[in-house]
Amino acid sequence: MKHLQTFRFIESVMRAGSIRKAADDMNITASALNRRIQRFEEEFGAEIFERLPRGVRLNPAGELLVQHFRAQASDLRRVQSQVADLSGERRGHVSVACSQALSPYFLPAQIAAYRRDHPGVTFSVNIRDRAAAEQDLATFSSDLALVFEPVHLVDMEVLIAVPQPIHVLMQTDHPLARKAELRLRDCLDFPHLAPTEQYGVRALLDMAVAKGTRSIRPVAESDSFDFMRHYVRHEKAAIAFQIPIGLREESASGLIHRPLSARDCAPGTLYLGQMRGRTLPVASARFAQALARVLEGYK
C-alpha cells in the first residue's frame, strides 16, 4: 500500500510535467514532494525522471516502473472485488474506453441496466479514438475497450466482434430518405460532414472512395459525432456518416438514417475486448459478459 501511495505521487508528477505543479495540485509543498520522489529513487536504485529546464518527464526506467505500478493496482482492484464477491456484495469499479458512437445511447443504457442489479459498482467511461482505446488497455487505464475498427488488435483479447455498416444520417424530408439503401456516389452529391482521420468511419469511407473517381470533400470535418448529428438538423441538404449502434430512429426530431450499400463501402467491425492475458476484476468481467450478451443481438 505504501508503494501505491508513492505511485500516486509519481503519476501526478508525470501528468503535470512539473514537480511544482503536481505539488500545487496535491496541496503539498514542492520540496516535500521532491524529497519523496528522491527517496523512492534511492530505494529503487535508479532515477525515474529526466530533469528538464522547465519540468520533468519519465525516463525509460520510469516508464517501466509506471507500467508495473498500473499492473499492481489492477491486480489489487481485482482481489478487492473478489473479496467483495465472497460476501455476495458486488462492488468494484469498471473503466471502459469506447468509441464516441457508443456514448449517446448504447453505453448509458447498458451501464444503468447493470447498476440496477449491482448498485455498488461504479464506472468511468473514457471516450477514445480507435488507437487511443487500445493504448488505454495496454496501460491499464481502462479495463475494457468497446471500439469501432481498432488499429492494431495485437494486445487486445477480443471478447466479441459485431459487424457495423456505415449509415447516412439526414433530415426526414431529404431526397435520399426515400431509398432503403444508399449509393456512396449519390451521397457525395450532397453537402456532407465527415469525421477526422483517426476514426474508423472515416477510414472506411476513404477506402471506399479510393476505388473510384470521387473523393470525400466535407463541408465540415469534426472529431465530434454529436456535432455532426446536430449540424444535420440545421442544414437541410446536409448528411453525416455514423454506425447504427450510435444512432436511433429520430424521426420525431426530424432525422432519419439509411445504410450505405455494401457494394460501395464494406461494413466495419465493432470490438469488445480486454488486455490480452489480463485477469479482470470481478465487476469488470461480469459487465463484459453482460455487454457481450447484448451485442450478440446486433450480429
Image (spheres, helix red, strand yellow):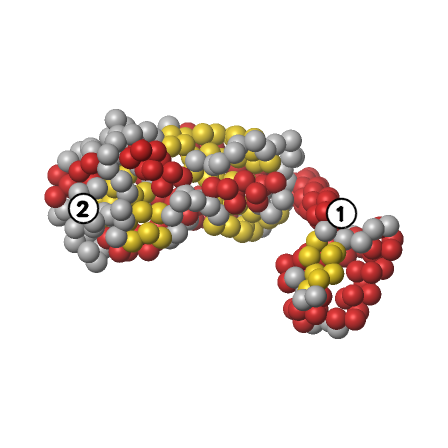
Q: Considering only vertical position in the picture, is 50 above or below 288?
A: below
Residue 190 circle label: 2
Q: CA distance from mark 2 to mark 1?
A: 53 Å
Is any atom of residue 132 visible in this view? Answer: yes
Q: Considering only vertical position in the picture, is 164 above or below 111?
A: above
Looking at numbered disc 1 in the image, what kind of residue is underneath it? Ala
| Nearer the observer, 220 or 231 | 220
Residue drawn 20% across the image and 33% down it? 183
Q: Secondary structure at mark 2?
A: loop
Q: Give whichever of discs 2 and 1 has the lower sequence position.
A: 1
Residue drawn 35% across the image and 47% down it? 195
Looking at numbered disc 2 in the image, what kind of residue is underneath it? Phe
Q: Which residue is mark 1?
A: 61
Which x, y percent locates residue 46?
A: 83, 51
| Nearer the observer, 144 or 198 | 198
Total residue callouts: 2
